[in-house]
Structures are given as C-alpha cells and as structure tokens.
Image: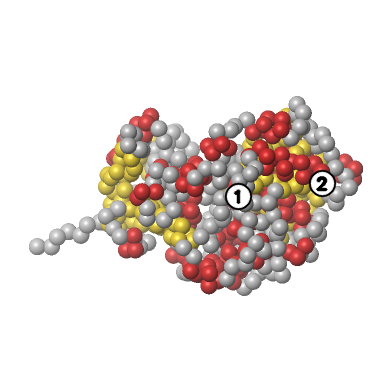
Amino acid sequence: MREVHIVGIGQTKVGEHWERSLRDLGVDAISAALKDANVEHVDALYVGNMLSGELAAQQHLGTLLADWAGLGNIEAVKVEAADASGAAAVRMGYLAVASGMQDLVLVCGVEKTTDADAEIANAAWSSGTDAEYEASQGLSMPAIAGLLMRRYMHEFGVQREDFAPLAVNAHAHGANNPYAMFRRPISAKAYARAGMVADPISMFDAAPLCDGAAAVVLCPGERASEFATKSVRIRASSMATDRLALHSRRDPLFLPAAHLSAQKAYLQAGVGPGDIDLFELHDAFTVMAALSLEACGFAERGKAVQLAQEGEISLQGRIPICTMGGLKARGHPIGATGVYQIVELVTQLRAEAGANQIDCHLGMAQSIGGSGATAVTHILEA
Amino acid sequence: MNIPRYWRTEKTRYGLIGETCRACGEAIFPPRDVCPHCTEAKQDVHPFRGKGQVYSFSTVYDAPASYTEYQPYTVALIKLDEGPLVTAQLTDIDNEDVRVGMPVEMVTRKIKEEGENGMIVYGYKFRPVLEEVKR
C-alpha cells in the first residue's frame, strides 16, 4: 500500500445558503481545493452526501459534480453512510490512492438541507436509523440522542448541566472560525436556559442542520513534493459498523464501532490516544461527543463530562476537541461534515488555524453515522 | 413508509410478535432472518408478553414530519421482561411523570395518520402498568 497525502483543501462557509444550490456548493468546495493544490485535473471524485435523494430529488451526485466542476469523464461516485458519509468518502479516496488504482483523487462532502421545511429535513435525517422500528415510532435523531443522554445521566449519576462545557467549548472555538455557522460564544447559563428539542437534548446540545461543502485533494506520498502546499500524511484510515438500531445493542452507552475504528487506526499509525494532539469528533449532540471520547480511550466510561469540566478539551487542554467549532458551532451539513473535519485537521497541521492554532503533529478525526452504527476514524500527521 | 411496508410488519406491530433463536435461546425483537446474537438462521415465532420497564426516555418537542401534530410526546427504550430492548412511544401518562425503571405494558394505539386520504397507522405503545383495584 502507498502512503497517501492531502495536498489541497477547500470549504464553503457553513450555514443557510439561500442563493446557492447543492451543486453550486459542491463546485465551490471542489474549485477551492483544486486551487489550493494548484491542479486542474484529477483521476477520480468521491462525493460524500446523505440526503440529496430525499431533499433535492437528485441522485447520481458523483457524475453531477464531476460534470458541473468540469472534471471531464473521470470515475465519480457518491458514498453514503448517514452522518459519516463524508468521512466514508475520504476513506474511499484513501483506498483508491493507497492501492495504486488512482493517483490524484478529489473527495467532496456536500449537503443542502435548508431547501426543505425543517420537519421534512428532520424526518429525512432520521432515515439513518432503522426506518421500520425507530423512525416509524416518531423518533428523530435528537430523540435517539435524548435516549442516550437520559440513560447516561441515569447510569453515571450526572446532571444535564454537566454537559454544558462540551457545548461552551465548541462555541468558543467556532467564534474564531470564519467558515463556522455560529460565531458567538455561549455561556453555561445560556446552556442551562436553552429550549428543549428532545428532552434532555436542548438546542445547545444539538448541532444545527445546515448547508455546506468541503473538499480535499489526495495524492500518493511520492508525488507530494510536486505540490506547493505543505502536505499532510494520512497515517491511518479505518471504519467499523455496529447494529443499526440503538435497541439492538447490548450496551447502548458503549459504541463498539467507534471503539473498533479507533483501535484499528491506532494500530495502523502505531500510536495511542496519548500521542494525539487534537481530536475532531462527532458532537452532533453533546452526549455523542462524550461517548466518542470514551470509546476512543480519552476518558474512562462515564468520565468524559468530567474531562470537559476540567478544561482538558479546550485548546490548551490535554486533548483539544472541536478546535474549529465542531459540529455544534461550525454546523452539521450532514454528509459534508466528515470532510470538514479533515479540512480542519489539515488547517491545524499546516499551522493555518489563526487564533485557534494549537501546537500539533498528530490529529485524529472520528465521524459517526446515526446513533453510533458507523464510525470512520482518520489519523493525520503534519 | 408506504402501505406494503406496514403490511409486512403488521404482526410485529400489532402483536409484538418476535422470535426465539433455536440455536442460542435468545429472544429476538424485531424478528429477523439471522440471529443477531449467534448468527444462526433458525428461529421460532415468539409472542412477547408485552411487559417491561422504561430503560430510557426522551420527550420530543421538535417532531419529524407527520408527527408534529402529536408533539410533545415521549419516546422510550423499553427493556422487555424476555430481554430485548424495543423503541416505542409511551401513552396514558403525562410526559413529566415518566421515570427510568417504571414498569410498563404494551397496548395498541394509533401511531399517526398519513394525511386526510392516507392510511391510519396503528402499532404498539407502552403505558404504565395499571395497579390492581384492591377490594
């Protein structure tokens, strides 16, 4: 297998893009990534997206974006794994380059949710659960997260307010990210007062659905020096799955997919959690951030909220998370999110993160689909 | 979901009909062709008793399409006496009275109406176990 490097990144601002369509956003991110890498031609395009079929009645997204971005008659395909679609597309791009089947590969994550009414987008998002036995009972994604959070509070003896530092941390970091949807810090007091979406999940526990696109250019290690950008190496790429429905898992508060994909990534990179300088995780809900930290070995079971309370997840902490705002403040354009995480890691590893820059050499990203049924983990090295 | 999908899952939804695995003995809900515990493909039909406890719950204020008219409503994971967890709405109880560990039993209720001319979907919900009247 060949080494794989990232030599170009691009992203749109995350938010409500009333004047830009799904394809416009995808092309914007692709163009930015090609410009960053200073290339015009690539060999393949992998597109991460979850809901274009449900919300835009548009499938065949690989070809659509290759066509509209002017990429020629290249191999192009959409990859879908619910919220982890973007990260799964990065992994497909990684496999294509590592195997030697492709040389220069573009990966683009794109999502457009605001063209649909909020409850339609909410229902579409829940299609990543078991449609016949979870969504069909009236469960939204926040409701499923609510089941996890309530059980977490019950089993580990913590209060709703104990989750506040996870949201406060993400918003503090998002304030300095020009691409983030929310640029204002929030207080623990505001968290405590927030309106309920799916009790105990409040507005400040849940990441917003929104629009956005991000892209990366991958190349084999031996060609990385051809590019002017400081290349970042993908040290590990791994993916694991679990039972689709929350009710089918033996222990809903342990995420085996997240644990296994992290363990495989640590093994591939020859590192452990203590070597990771920053961690972009799946904070679609505060409780998911806690479960991801625990599954990946950054906190004992039931202790992630304490880690957050002790300030260890801040830019100066032991394991900074959501360094550009995370899903909570940057926003969660579902199928694009996994690519945003990679773009943000590269930004940090190139030392281009501005006010949020941390001293880093190894960064990890973990994207989770649904309530933990898919997990994709990448470790990147400066 | 569309009509054939409801029709195919009718027994499961109306009668809480699941399976027990002939190989490992585990109770399985919802029914599936391959046992999620031992991966054997030999199961017997098993009607669940419909009794269990609230394992966790969440009250939905921001419902997905076609459920908005019922909000706020409480959804739960129910730990059935036979073992499996099942995802369902709670009924016949005020949202603020729900507690983890509360004994509940299955009842058949309307889940939703699919528009004025669409079908009315019925299925299982769970309510607090009614206390016997002492004479």
Residue A233: where, in percent of width, then height? 80, 49
Task: Answer with left or right where residue A213 lies relative to residue B33.
Answer: right
Q: Residues within 10 Å of mark 2 (few under 14, many from 20)?
A: some
Q: B44 or A84: nearer the eye?
A: A84
**Residue B1, picture quadrant:** top left
Q: Where B46 falls versus A313 (above or below)?
A: above
Question: Do tag 2 and tag 1 residues touch (Cβ < 8 Å)?
Answer: no
* Quadrant (top left, top right, bottom left, bottom right) of the C terminus of chain A: bottom right
Both labels 2 and 1 in a single chain: yes
Look at discs 2 and 1 and give the one toward the viewer: 1
For marks 2 and 1, give the CA distance: 25 Å
Amino acid residing under circle 1: Glu
Check residue A6 in the rendering and tell me which mark sits there, or answer none. none
> Residue under circle 1?
A16
Q: Is residue B47 visible?
A: no
**Residue A199, picture quadrant:** bottom left
What's the residue at 38%, 35% (across, down)? B43
Task: Answer with left or right where residue B54 lies relative to residue A337.
Answer: left
Residue A205: where, in percent of width, then height? 53, 61
Which structural element holds mark 1?
A: loop
* Quadrant (top left, top right, bottom left, bottom right) of the N terminus of chain A: top right
> Residue under circle 2?
A36
Q: Mark 1 falls within which chain?
A: A
